[in-house]
Image (cartoon, grey):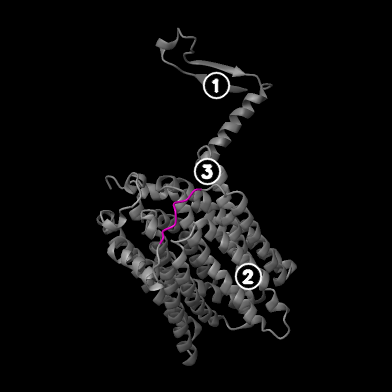
Amino acid sequence: MLSLTCTVEPKLANHNRCFFIEFFVPERWSLNKQGLIRGVMQERFRTWFPLRKGEAGLVFSLGFILFANYAAMGITKVVSVSGFLSEVKDHYILLVWAVDMVLLILATGVQSLIVDRFDRMKLLAGVLMAFAALYALLPLTFLIDGFPSSVGYTLIYLLNDQQWRFFPVVFWILVNDIYDPATGRRVMPVIAVFSFIGTIAGLAVAAVDAQLSFGTINLLLVNAGIFLTAWLVTQIRMRTVKLPPPIVVSDSMKETLTEGWEFIKTVPAFAYLALGMLATGSVMTVLLFDSLSDAKLDLGGGFQSFYALYNLAIAIASIFMQGFSARLIEKISLKRSFLIQPFVMLLSTIVNFIFPGFLSSSVSQGVSRASYDTLDLSARKAFQAMVPNEKRGRVSMFIDSYLPSTGTIIGSLVTFGILLFGLSFGLGRDLYTRIYLGAGVAFAILAFYSAFRVRATYEQSMLNWQLKRRTRGSSVLDKLDFGDQGK
């Protein structure tokens, strides 16, 4: 039986209304019950996906493109790392990371010349087509007789990591152009969920490959097809998207980089955020290497299966964290949200230092990665939305690419130097592991200090002339209300 209660004030009783009347609906009226259940489900859906009328088509098109990128990354991430570690000693991957970041910085320098000058929809389509072509060509490295497989896996890893840093910058700058800050705060977490769904799909394929051995060549061709499909979505589903006209400038690469850096130096909160991103890149590198090294030592041939399932667990956890990231930022305020990631990294490195081993390193890196890809990413993107459109691309390049990449180089070289010293002088693995984890703790303390300074200089930075937009409209401060009042 279905019980409903109708309650109104007595003065409304003479208008055919009810007053504290309880009645029962027979079970055979199942359609009404189904309607109520459907209403509850729709309300739950709106809570997780707070979209308004007319927004779903574009949001889900953008979501699919993000899904495609992360699905392809999930497939090759596991294959490239496990393949590389099976061919060479684990600490040499630190040098690969350092070289990878140098290449990324150079590629980003070229990217910075075009990101604020060309139509960003065409730029995204061009990036998708370029990745499709590269993944279609990579199988040749495994088909050519005598070509070292270790080099082939290194090339896959380099492409995968360039994709991880390069693609999101182009994509999120485009999203920031499409939506105003207030709308972006509401829809960006919805779009970001697709990155985790794509990661889960890609890692699931990699996990199955560990058991069934589809082969590296077939997986690379699958990635090429994924990017080609995403390119078709941009051509078919997003043709009507209207964007601000590109900025007509003729700056050199040096001038372009200088302008972005000058903005960051001039706005105190962005300057401290930049320092924090540099330290974050170093900490995340130390944690990642420690987890890979411990897993390879303890698991041996079962590494690929573990690595796929491990990253799958991180992706699933990230989906749940992303679901409440916007609400958490709104509750504690944007300026305080930058304290979350440094605190998580500091706690993780300290725990890993005190309790070394396979389980500790895996959990420490996993928690830090999930926090970085959800809460920290959402906070950074909301903060970058305050940057004027004509400068946003170059500022985003520094915050999301140059500085984390430089931090990765620092973390890789420091860790490799400690390992080389330890191996040369016959130090035990436990000893040199604690030394580079101690360096990670130092980097995490620097990141924590930087986050405190972001919080302290937030209001002062909002008054900086650099944040004044050329475009008409209401103040971005009015649109981005993260609950700072009275706090």
Q: Helix or strand or loop: what does disc 1 sit on?
A: strand
Disc 1 vs disc 3: which is toward the camera? 3
Residue appearing at x 45%, y 7% in the figure: 14
Question: Which tag, 1 or 2, sits closer to the chain's start?
Answer: 1
Residue appearing at x 67%, y 75% in the figure: 301
Query: Around disc 3, counting alpha carbons within 10 Å, would you say few (fewer than 14), some (14 to 19), or many (20 or more)?
Result: some
Mark 1–mark 2 contact, CB under 8 Å?
Answer: no
Q: Residue at label 1?
A: 4
> Residue 436: where, in percent of width, then height?
43, 79
Query: Around disc 2, counting alpha carbons within 10 Å, would you say few (fewer than 14), some (14 to 19), or many (20 or more)?
Result: some
The amino acid marked with disc number 2 is Leu
- How far apart are the alpha carbons under marks 1 and 3? 29 Å
Residue appearing at x 32%, y 46% in the figure: 475
Q: Which mark is residue 379?
A: none
Q: Which mark is residue 49?
A: 3
Relative to residue 206, is residue 442 drawn left or right? Answer: left
Residue 244 magenta: yes
Q: Main secondary structure of the magenta part?
A: loop
- How far apart are the alpha carbons under marks 1 and 2? 62 Å
Q: Residue at label 2?
A: 134
Disc 2 vs disc 3: which is toward the camera? 2
Can residue 233 be seen in this snapshot? yes
Question: Which tag, 1 or 3, sits closer to the chain's start?
Answer: 1
> Residue 349: where, in percent of width, then height?
43, 70
Residue stretch in magenta = 242-248
